[in-house]
Each structure stands twice: as C-alpha cells, then as structure tokens.
Amino acid sequence: MTDTRTIQRLDSAHFLHPFTDHKALAEHGARVMVKGEGIYLWDSEGNKILDGMSGLWCVNIGYGRTSMSDAVYRQMQQLPFYNSFFNTTNVPAVQLAALLVQVSPPQFNHVFFTGSGSEANDTIVRMVRRYWELQAQPERHIIISRKNAYHGSTIAGASLGGMAGMHAQGGPGVPGIVHIGQPSYLEGGAGMSEDEFGIAAAGWLDERIRELGPDNVAAFIGEPVQGAGGVIIPPKTYWPEIQRICDKYGILLVADEVICGFGRLGSWFGSELMGIKPDLIAFAKGVTSGYIPLGGVLVGDRVATVLTEKGGDFNHGFTYSGHPVACAAALENIRILIDEDLVGKVARDTGPYLKEKFGALREHALVGHADSCGFVAGLNLVHTKGATVFDNIVFDGDDGVGMICRGYMFANGIIMRAVGDRMIIAPPLVMTRDEIDEMVGRIRAALDDTLAELKRRGML
Ligand code: PMP
C-alpha cells in the first residue's frame, strides 16, 4: 500500500476527515504527506513543499527533531501510560506542570492537563462554572465569547466558538454562552482610527454584560489573535480595555492560547504581548509542537485557590490527563524552545523581518491589505484597490478566489491557508531570514499565477 492512488482510494473509502466535503475530496483524492524536515514537507509524489502553516499552527520547532523521538521512545519504554486519577501521578507530568509554571505569567501556579485544545476549552467551561458555584454565586454562569472565534469542535468548544457554519450543524449547543462582535478593524473600523476602534469593540463587552446583568456573567473568553477566523489582529487598545471591563465587573478573563501560546506571537503567551493578565489560559498545539497530542489549562491563583481550598472533588478529567509520553514530548519541546531561544528570535529578529517582507506584498495588484504579528500573518485578496482599505472592492464570496489562490500556493510549493479571500500563514518558529525570503517569493509567484488565472476567467 505505497502508491498514491491506492492510498487515496482507501482514504476516500474509510477515512472521514475533519471539516471536509467528502464528495469533493473523493473526486480528486487527498494529498498524501509522507515526510517532514525543518520547515519542509514531502508528499507521496515527491513534491517538496514549504509548510507556511506549521502543520496546523503547531509544529513550532519544525519537523524531524530526533531528540523528540528519543524522548518519546525512552518514556514509552519506561512507562507508556498511567492515569492521574486515584491519587497517583507520574514523573513527566509533574515535571511538565512545574516547567509550565516557570514559563507562564506569574499568576499561574497550577495546570490541568487534557488531550487537545477542544478538551481544554470544555474543561474551562466546567471549571469556570464550578468556581462560581464554590463562590456561592451559581447564577454567574454565562460565558461571553466572540463571533468568528474558534475554540474547538467538541460540543462546548463549538458552542464557545463563533463560527456560524458550526452553529448551524449538530443541534443545540451548550446553554449560557453568548457572542459579541470580533475586533476586526477591516470589518467594523471605517471612520475610526485603529485605537478608537479597539476601544469601541471592547465596549461591546461592557454593553452585553449590562444587558445580561453583571451578576449572571461568569467569564469572557477570546484568542489574543484570532487564528482560524483569519488571523484577526486586534488594535493594541482592545485587550487592555477588555481587561479593565472584566475587572470592573469581577468577571473571569480567559485567554484561548491554543495557537498563540509557546512563542507564536514572539512572546511565550499572547496575553503577555497584549498586556493582559488572564485568570485561565487554554493551551495545546505548540506545547508539544504537535509531535504528540497534548493540551491543558493554566489555572491562575484566583481560581486555583478556590478549587484547591474549598473545592472537594472537581468531577472532571480525562484518561489521558497528564499522559506520561505526551508530557515527555512537551518537556523536550520546551527545552528546545528555551535552548534555541526561538521565542526571542521571533520577537527580535525573524518576526520583524517577516513583517517587513510580508508587508511588502501589499504592493501586489491583488493584495488590499497585509499584516502580521510575530509569526502569524494574513493578506486580503481584493478585486480593486481603493484609496484606503475601506475603499477596496472585494470579490464575490461565492467566486472562491481564496481557494483558487490556495491551489496556486500548492503549485508553487508553499502551504498557505485560505479563510474566504484572506490568505494566512503561521510558519514554524525555526524559520530563518533566508527561508522567509524563499516563502515570500513563493507567495508572490502564486499571487501572480492567481492574477493571471482570474484574468483568464474574466473575473478581473
Ligand atoms: N482553540 C483554538 C484557538 C484553536 O485554534 C484550536 C484548533 N485550531 C482549538 C481551540 C481546538 O484545538 P484541538 O483541535 O486540539 O481540539
């Protein structure tokens, strides 16, 4: 079973993929990835592809790290599994909890482990409500999130998320979750400076809290930079104002750092860059660079003190909470991040370099806007550029211009994701300046090809 066609046939016959139209997939067959090294992937046809998405926002240390496989191998031989229920623990889980406390902001001294980012957010919903029950305020149960947020695909994750397409499927979600608008300057900022818009967008939280009654609101949750929603980088005034509003009403502030954690924005956690002090942080992805699944919740002192001192049993947990092999992988991954100063490099060197080079794509005829924050970046494909970003003429959403462009990205040996007509990247943190030049060159070539194709189709 090694030739591409056989694998594709079996894939399409038996493997139900996430977020996939299987009828469409069956027509052309999946791309089969077979190998990774550094920032590159190889498919089963021998194509070498630069991975601009770090797998799925997770392979921060790059592919092919043998010290990761060594760490996992050693732990599998020593103790492949034991649970952390019933007053037992294991060495890598304890070591990892202690290390996470060291690399996270000072208010965090406790960790709850899960198997994924979705499970981390499910844990947060139950933990936040448990906290308010223990504080004798059980009526504080409503969690406020944002439209176009992504918080996972479990029932609580999808309910917390603000993706209309997800809410439309699978029946009713978890009650007691409401959504406010996202801080997208392009979408809502016309007539305002970015700073003014940041304050206005945070004000939607204040308004909603007053509508709901502050005594009914448990928490606000948001991604420091929205990822799956299309790399929405908020104005710098937004998060401090959100913090001020949460503090004013005594509401818990939750940062979903499944993407932003572990150096993605050039800080260990995105909330540090945004200047906020969350009570809870959801993490996953970059904690192991995706080599083995692991997620969790960093639990700040405000919540941990109540849970541990008043709590009794918190009736919640997973078979794989504190999985020794996953924790061993995370320990090695964090060692690499620290020893190679990957977070500092993104902050001081390669992040600013990416901003300059990626930002220069604004000059391309198809690009109406391009921005970045650390090692996430996005550009908007537009039909006609206007005097300001608010005067750009966009394509009809049904024309699928983003998907056409994504196809040309692959053809030019680069993986870039399309969210509507916004093209986004989140490259591995190990990417060098030369590799950034190569990536931006490939993106530019793919944009040229897209432009030519749109002209051929009479869409421009
Ligand atoms: N939160 C955010 C911000 C995410 O980006 C994701 C995954 N893309 C999740 C939660 C869900 O994580 P997982 O897929 O590991 O369940």
Image (cartoon, rainbow, N blue to C red):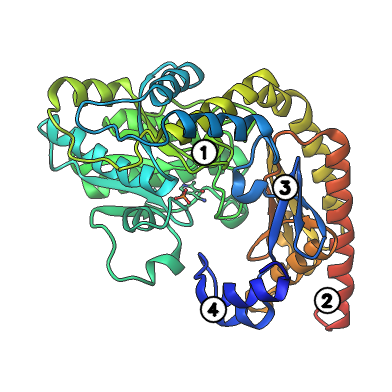
Q: Earlier in the sequence, mark 3 or mark 2?
A: 3
Q: Amino acid at mark 3?
A: Gly
Q: Which mark is residue 224?
A: 1
Q: Nearer the viewer, mark 4 or mark 1?
A: 4
Mark 3 or 2, which is nearer the eye?
A: 3
Relative height, residue 141 to residue 28 (above, below): above
Other residues around mark 2 within 10 Å, as few (<14) / some (14–19) / many (≥20): some
Density class for disc 3 (Cα within 10 Å; few <14, some 14-19, many ≥20) is: some
Q: Which residue is mark 3?
A: 36
Q: Which residue is mark 2?
A: 454
Which badge, 4 or 1, comes first in the chain's sequence?
4
Residue 184, horizontal then vertical, whole percent: 56, 51
- Of marks 3 and 4, which one's residue comes earlier in the chain? 4
Disc 1 vs disc 3: which is toward the camera? 3
- In the shown orientation, is residue 22 left or right of residue 409? left
Query: Where on the picture, by quarter, is residue 390?
Result: bottom right
Q: Name the mark nearer the viewer: 4 or 2.
A: 4
Q: Is the C-beta separation of discs 3 and 4 under 8 Å?
A: no
Of the pair 417 and 33, the residue shown nearer to us: 33
Mark 1 to mark 3: distance in Å?
29 Å
Callout 3–callout 2 Cβ contact below 8 Å: no
* Secondary structure at numbered mark 3: strand
Whole-angstrom CA distance, mark 1 to mark 2, is 35 Å
Relative height, residue 458 to residue 435 (above, below): below
Residue 214: where, in percent of width, then height? 22, 40
3D distance between C-alphas at marks 4 and 2: 34 Å
